[in-house]
Amino acid sequence: MLVAAAVCPCPPLLVPEVATGAAPELDAARAACADTLGLLAAARPDRLYVVGPADEGAHGVFPAGSTGSFAGFGVDLSVRLGDPTGPGRTGGEPDTGRPLPVSLAVGAWLLERAGWADAPIEGLAVDGEATPDVCAGLGRGLAASAGRVALLVTGDGSACRTVKAPGYLDERAAAFDAEAARALGTADVAALLALDPEPAYELKAAGRAPWQVLAGAAEGAGLDGRLLFEDAPYGVGYFVAAWS
């Protein structure tokens, strides 16, 4: 059963070594992520799943101990998703031939930064083309896997908020992000599942599928939500929320 969830953005710029001189611009987002991970630990889960959007062709399960790197962003920095030899391990030895996608690498970095040692970890990278029903089904499976399950859900909103955004300006972006932020901040499962994959794809909102996995996991759990951070500093919607 899902007992808690943390929602965080996953831009590589969240990692100060990647952001370099621009690092202070996301200090507030980093602080909010630290706060929501603290709330996640307080829920005392038996198992933690890190869920994020897949890189192209890299969806599926990533066991504890899987590693990722920010070398593609010019930084000699590696991260590891939990400890594959710890108590209650959920997977086998890490698949060294399958590096973590960026979203899960950022999640692993957040957990390392928080000193997470509260529950075994496993990663799930979600195909961006997965339908809401498929995503919800994945979430239900995660929630049913242990008595007390927590999720760290990584994903960004629209990348079309300004003319300098990665997807340029789209007038629909602000409304899409406002509804996503409202749903994440109120733990509105039905509203998250109602997010339409087509406009989400057009607006480059990579968080849509992971958020719908969260919605499926949270069905019937009766969780409350709180929005801790909302901004679009680079024309991309970033949200931090806590569900408990």
Image (cartoon, helix red, strand yellow):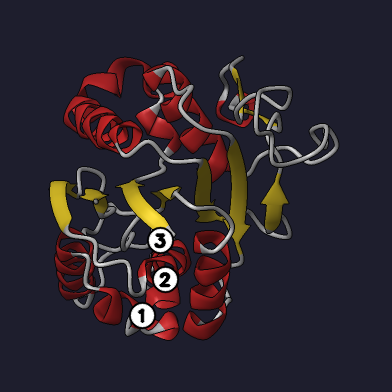
- Residue at image mark 1: 193
State which quadrant residue 207 falls in: bottom left
State which quadrant residue 39 falls in: top left
Q: What kind of residue is marked 2?
A: Gln
Secondary structure of the residue carrying numbered label 1: helix
Q: Please name which of the two marks, 1 or 3, marks the residue nearer to the observer.
A: 1
Q: In the rendered structure, are the residues bearing label 3 and label 2 in contact, judged by CB atoms less than 8 Å apart?
A: no
Secondary structure of the residue carrying numbered label 3: loop
The x, y position of residue 212, in whole percent, is 42, 71
Q: State the residue lying farthest toward the front.
A: 147
The answer to whether residue 54 of the structure is visible from this angle is no
The x, y position of residue 2, in whole percent, is 40, 57
Of marks 2 and 1, which one's residue comes earlier in the chain? Answer: 1
Q: What kind of residue is marked 3?
A: Gly
Q: In the rendered structure, are the residues bearing label 2 and label 1 in contact, judged by CB atoms less than 8 Å apart?
A: yes
- Residue at image mark 3: 207
The x, y position of residue 194, in whole percent, is 32, 85
